[in-house]
Image (spheres, rainbow, N blue to C red):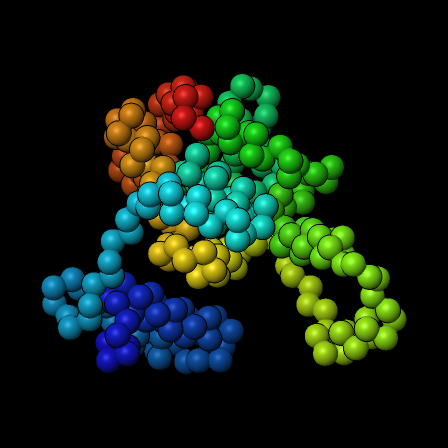
Amino acid sequence: MITAGHCRTRINRQVGRIKHVFKWGVANEIVPPETYQALLPVDGLTRGRTEARESRPVRPIEDSRAHGIYAFVSAQVRAMIELQLLSGMRPGEVVAMRACDLDTTHASWVYRPAQHKTEHHGIARQIVLGPRAQEVIRPFLKPDLSAFLFSPRDAQAKRHADQRAQRRTPMTPSQHARRAKQRPEWTPNEHYTRGTYANAIRRACLASGVLHWHPNQLQHSAATRLRKQFGLEVARAAFGHRSAVTTERYAEIDVDRVADAMRQVG
């Protein structure tokens, strides 16, 4: 993996996955327990003590680069980009947003993702959504509260409807049959994944000529802006940048102070 040019953190993740496969094999009585036990002492690569390269830190991006691809993405992808910039949520959180996870009973809405990065540490994730973020969300609210707000199926349906509206002549049955044979219909998933979301942004960057950026950079941009305006303590609470040691220290400021900040910026 080092020869292939993978960074140290990626190699460590891959080794962890391999060890997990053997653990699953032992649990299902496919692999002898001693095989997995022999793998347990295998540690990850340590910074400064390996030839593997280090990954580049995730940097914020300028708003102009994010806005520069709006004309080349669907309304759903644009909404997710705007929400990340306004609220600082992670890509995995924005793609999985549902109405049933939203508390809209107060002026500042609170989004509690069903799954999030730090839930295994017992940390509750609350994302406060201010007025501007609420306006982004409202057009995508659905009667089915358990439905995902941002669906590639909805984006595809809208794209097909626009294509039909732009046709000057109706498609004949023979044309429709020939097209179906050459390009069988592909049904997208009911919601975006982190990968499909990132791919949509990558394609839009190529089409627009904007220097490529990744959805994770949007969270860093929002965090940088909020920290600059309101300080490190509020930024850490807003974006869930808390270790198990500092959880109690910042728990008391979560909703009230973050809500006050979000009313001003998002």
Image location (x, y in percent) of residue 177: 82, 75
- View extreme (left): residue: 48
Q: Nearer the viewer, residue 207 or 85?
A: 207
Task: Describe residue 100's horizontal placement relative to residue 119 as left or right.
Answer: right
Q: Is residue 82 above or below residue 260?
A: below
Q: Quadrant of residue 35?
A: bottom left
In this orientation, does residue 211 appear? yes
Q: Residue at 47% across / 60% down in the picture?
A: 207
Image location (x, y in percent) of residue 235: 32, 31
Q: Quadrant of the C terminus?
A: top left
- View extreme (front): residue: 168
Q: Residue at 41% across / 74% down in the picture?
A: 22
Task: Describe residue 151's horizontal placement relative to residue 198 as left or right.
Answer: right
Image location (x, y in percent) of residue 99: 63, 36
Q: Is residue 175 above or below residue 107?
A: below
Q: Nearer the viewer, residue 214 or 231?
A: 214
Image location (x, y in percent) of residue 3: 24, 80
Q: Is residue 17 above or below residue 57?
A: below
Q: Nearer the viewer, residue 169 or 54?
A: 169
Q: Is residue 231 above or below residue 40?
A: above
> Count of labels shown?
0
Q: Residue at 56% across / 54% down in the picture?
A: 192
Q: Quadrant of the N terminus?
A: bottom left
Q: Nearer the viewer, residue 87 or 185?
A: 185
Q: Residue at 72% across / 40% down in the picture?
A: 144
In this orientation, does residue 120 appear? no
